[in-house]
Image (cartoon, rainbow, N blue to C red):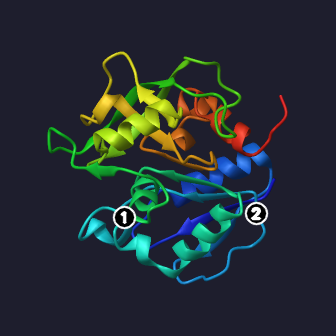
């Protein structure tokens, strides 16, 4: 399956994401720039982490208004898989492709460490290679990962199984409501998560817990 990685000024995890997709699929992803109005025919579009546009206004707010995001929304409407990691998650929320908001960490400090995640929903194209309720390790690195949604939205997310990843075993690093670490849209093809699975895909990273997410999204056979 073919993939694409979005490049925006201030992102700093694009090379990590490109390396992960290349290692797992054997096919280097194409790259698309902020001003691109068309995206090649791919199966997966990834917005990596970092600090797009210096996190001015709000994290992801400026990036969400770049021409490339309209092209991504059009691809998502056609069923193409879209994944946003960390700042990518913030961008997807600011662009209206995912509900809720990502606020400052409750302790108002940048956090960079490993957390534990529970896989809440394995009936998605991103998580089908995990086991229901599986606890995995994953690094985080963010200042604004405190997920929030109003009660109505939260009830809809929980009721529809749209909460895909949850911080587990007391490892919530940011105060996110209901320990939410990652959500998916109603259609099931747009995923946003704060942790960085691309940084735990091979033994050199200290573990491979993030690998199954990419294998799932890229349709890699067992």
Residue 46's disc number: none
Nearer to the camera, 213 or 76: 76
Residue 155 against residue 97 in the figure, above or below = above
Q: Measuring from the top left, give residue 7's x and y in whole percent.
A: 53, 70
Residue at coordinates 80% horizontally, 50% vertically from top-left?
26
Q: Which residue is mark 2?
A: 42
Q: Are marks 1 and 2 in contact (CB under 8 Å)?
A: no
Q: Measuring from the top left, give residue 195's x and y in whole percent.
A: 44, 40
Residue 164 against residue 92 in the figure, above or below = above
Nearer to the camera, 30 or 79: 79
Q: Measuring from the top left, give residue 111's x and y in whole percent.
A: 27, 40
* Element marked by disc 2: loop
| Residue 29 in sight | yes
* Element marked by disc 1: loop
Q: Residue furthest right?
A: 221
Q: Which residue is mark 1?
A: 60
């Amino acid at each position: 399956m073919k993939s694409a990685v979005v490049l925006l000024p201030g992102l700093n995890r694009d090379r990590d994401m490109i390396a992960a997709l290349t290692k797992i699929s054997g096919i280097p992803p194409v790259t698309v720039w902020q001003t691109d109005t068309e995206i090649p025919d791919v199966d997966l579009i990834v917005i990596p982490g970092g600090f797009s546009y210096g996190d001015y206004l709000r994290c992801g707010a400026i990036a969400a208004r770049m021409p490339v995001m309209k092209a991504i929304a059009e691809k998502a409407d056609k069923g193409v898989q879209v994944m946003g990691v960390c700042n990518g998650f913030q961008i997807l929320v600011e662009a209206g492709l995912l509900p809720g908001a990502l606020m400052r960490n409750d302790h108002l400090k940048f956090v960079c460490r490993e957390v534990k995640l529970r896989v809440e929903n394995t009936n998605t194209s991103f998580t089908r290679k995990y086991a229901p309720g599986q606890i995995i390790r994953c690094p985080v690195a963010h200042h604004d990962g405190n997920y929030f949604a109003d009660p109505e939205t939260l009830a809809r997310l929980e009721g529809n199984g749209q909460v895909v990843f949850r911080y587990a075993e007391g490892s919530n690093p940011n105060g996110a409501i209901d320990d939410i670490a990652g959500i998916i849209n109603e259609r099931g093809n747009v995923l946003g998560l704060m942790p960085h699975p691309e940084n735990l895909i091979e033994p050199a990273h200290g573990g491979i817990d993030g690998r199954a997410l990419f294998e799932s999204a890229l349709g890699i056979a067992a």
